[in-house]
Amino acid sequence: MVEAAPRAGSAAADGLDAAVVAAARRGEPWAQRRLIAALQDPVHRLVWRMLGTAGRDHVAQDLTQEALVRIVRALPGYVEGGAAKFSTWALTIASRTAIDELRRRVLPTAPPQALAVLPQGDPMPDLALERAAIGDAIAAAIDELAPEIRATFVLRAYHELEYHEIAEALDVDLGTVKSRLFRARAALQRRLERLRRDD
Amino acid sequence: MIDDHDSDGPTTMPPHHVLEAFTVPTLPSDFTDRVMASLQPPGANPVMTAAALQSPRASWPWLVSGLAMGAAATAAVTLLVLHLHAPAPTTHEPVVLAPVPGEPLAPVVAVSPAPKFGHLVITCEPGDAIVRVDGRTIPGTSPVVVTNLVPGPHDVVVEREGHTGWSQRIDVPADVLPLTLRLPEIAAPDLDAFMPPPDDAAAAPAKAVRPRPKKSGPRSLRDIFGASDSGGSPDLKDPFARSDEPERTLSVRASDQDEPASADVLLLLATDAGTRPAEVFVDGAAMGTTPLSTRAIPPGRHDIRFRWDDGTSVADSVVLRAGTKVVLRAR
């Protein structure tokens, strides 16, 4: 009889075995590798989106790499079963890494991508083009936002963190989280409205 | 999608399918390796970043590194060819890691796990279970990580006092295999089930058993003192038993009787769930078939035997104290 019974909020509840996290904290390479493999995609998605159009090419990958290294090195500070889920704790570090980078230097924003290269014989080319245009509009909207507001928006829209989790991750109060989201949605709405008018 | 937490402002979050239009490319397949290399101490290996890989001006160090790596690769191939003709290596001792809070971890003796080894990560609910792999008891208690196992079948046993044990032959792959278990607690016996109804007690008096003198010969001693509950650790079937006969065990649990002080002994005799009823003999005299309860056994030492119809039996010599309630359970 084998049953999976992870505690809610524990590393195991995030799909990472608590023993693997514990082994990674001790510096065991096999556990660190497993941890990195589990976290690299969500961290990359967060970083890529926070960078907006500047995430193209190698910037997002390098920042993802840096965030993962920070996460692994910060493991001794993670409290199993504490207030934050493990994934939330890891995304906190990743978002702060991205904020630090965005503050440190002004990243060049890329021009709106040309029409996306569609695979031959794409059954719904118009839909694919429309989606690509929407994606660009969202990226452009994010370009307008300050780093902290970007982080708030991405954590809410793409990682579904609760307001209080975002507040704790970014070390701000709930009111600040709400006002930042308001501004992010306003920028997004303007971009999407412009896209609709241009169509 | 309306962001339910917003109570002010006309703007709402776009629907999910719109947000997902902002797609993210997949990471290269060697990205994990790149991050692992970044975790190496300074000077160990040059850190690979996407920028470094793309920059032509940074290529010279990579060229030198490439030549060195080429030489190393040649040496590695040579060693591999020699190794293939070498005698088979001895079995690799699994390295056991049992995290103990506050204690520094002992250095891993074996090399860092290579893809050819398997690793078991055993977590148990409740924790602090004893783990045995291939008959070897793992130091400490769960959760434990057993590394450097040769891929293939391994016998794993997990036990915890007061809980039903678990044992299984696990096919360990050349990878990390998490094993999460839940051990059900052994339920206390339903003593009411052993008590005869009041009417039956009057109609069929319990058999009187005359205590017999001690028999000589080897016997196990099981002294029961006062109200201490023996705990009744589960008797696990030995997964490595070669005999075809079922292994018979006897557990004893004693406590003070609930009713007001009584000088006699309340003896309850039963077999485990899933075990056939057995005939019970006290000091050689047949008492009947389980489940049985009797107050007719006087305090003192007695030989108790459970015998099944397949000829197997289990016996023990127990000391019964006055005023106690004793449960003998056999399987």
Image: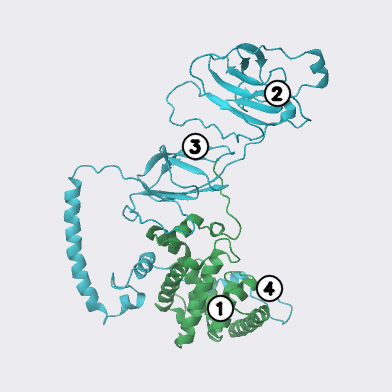
Chain colours: A green, B cyan
| 3D distance between C-alphas at marks 1 and 4 | 17 Å
Instruction: Determine the chain carrying the residue at label 2.
Output: B
Position of residue B149 measured from the top left corner of the image (x, y, whole percent)? 37, 46
Q: Give the residue at mark 4.
A: B3
Identify the residue shown where x is 39% and y is 65%. Answer: B32
Q: Give the residue at mark 3.
A: B167
Q: Give the residue at mark 1.
A: A151
Q: Is residue A48 above or below residue B249?
A: below
Q: Are marks 1 and 4 in contact (CB under 8 Å)?
A: no
Q: Is residue B187 visible?
A: yes
Position of residue A27 measured from the top left corner of the image (x, y, whole percent)? 40, 62
* Element marked by disc 2: loop
| 3D distance between C-alphas at marks 1 and 2 | 73 Å
Q: Is residue B90 above or below residue B59?
A: above
State the quadrant of the C terminus of chain B: top right
Position of residue B84 measured from the top left corner of the image (x, y, whole percent)? 20, 47
Circle nearer the viewer, 4 or 3: 3
Identify the residue shown where x is 77% and y is 29%. Answer: B261
